[in-house]
Image (tube, helix red, strand yellow):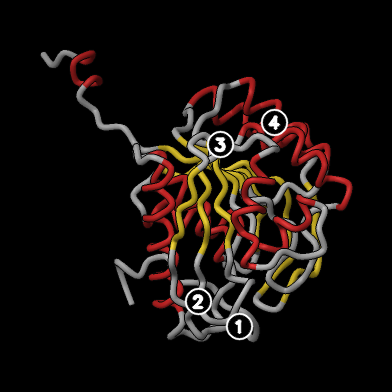
Amino acid sequence: MTDKSNASEQLRTYCRVLTIAGSDSGGGAGIQADLKTFSALGCYGMTAITALTAQNTRGVTSIHAVPPSFAAQQLEAVFSDIGADAVKIGMLYSVELIETVAEQLLKYGARNIVLDPVMVAQSGDRLLRDDAVEALKKHLMPLATVATPNLPEAAVLLGQNEIDVQDLPASARGLARFGSRSLLVKGGHGNDRDSSDLLYLAKEDRMVELKGERIDTRNNHGTGCTLSSAIAAFLAKGADIESAARQAKDFITRAIRAGSGYRIGRGHGPVHHFFDYWQ
């Protein structure tokens, strides 16, 4: 007879990544982009949906926020049974959702938390209420292993009108005051020459430039979601912060390049998450 306990011990386990974010009905960003990224990188993806959006390649036409109590139930369902090796946080929309998510992360001792402080969609539509910015800084930044703001988001978090790409080091140090262990400040909005980012490892007070080419394409919807999800996936697989960020940067660059040859919708199309599997 087969010893069931021994057989159970020999079963393989997944690298588990939970995304807490909004749903993009167009499939290019949000929960959908996160799950595609996790799958492409060999991880098992789970979701806690914070908002439903009516969205396509041209923009967001409607947002329906999930009640905070139901968001909590989703998180409890995942953490109490499956668990998570890493967590990616995207669109949260309101103060109440931010406080609920922070409470559940603390309750279950979540680790390897990647915070993408999503505020505005590619189309310019607002995805975070103005009164939620302070709550984000107070409740979630201190829990983050790495936060991944782009330049406009970094400016909002720091209370500035704008940030020049030359000021990235000072901005990263300023953002670290909110408690995140590290910052990946995305510099793609800062110039038209390249798409390089700056990783700041706060404990070491060390800056790491992640160089990236600028690819001429309209298919750049969901790039921020994909990058932060890739970092979470690599952290779940055991990489340190710097290695996870470097590998994620390479992944998003290749995904943008592969997706640039496609046409979908009449606005900003998605990146190609599965470039390693089909063209």
The answer to which of 277 and 199 lies nearer the viewer is 199
Measure the C-alpha gap from mark 2 to mark 3. Answer: 26 Å
Q: Secondary structure at mark 2?
A: loop
Residue with the mark numbered 4: 102
Q: Secondary structure at mark 1?
A: loop
State the quadrant of the C terminus: bottom left
Residue with the mark numbered 1: 265
The answer to which of 37 and 182 lies nearer the viewer is 182
Residue with the mark numbered 3: 181
Reading the chain from its start, which is encountered first: label 2 or label 3?
3
Where is residue 106 drawn, in percent x and y?
64, 23
Counting the numbered discs, the total is 4
Residue plotted at (51% across, 59% down): 226
Which label lies toward us, 4 or 2? 2
Reading the chain from its start, which is encountered first: label 1 or label 4?
4
Q: Is residue 200 above or below residue 222?
A: above
What crowding class fits label 2: few (fewer than 14 Cα within 10 Å), some (14-19), or many (20 or more)?
Answer: some
State the quadrant of the N terminus: top left
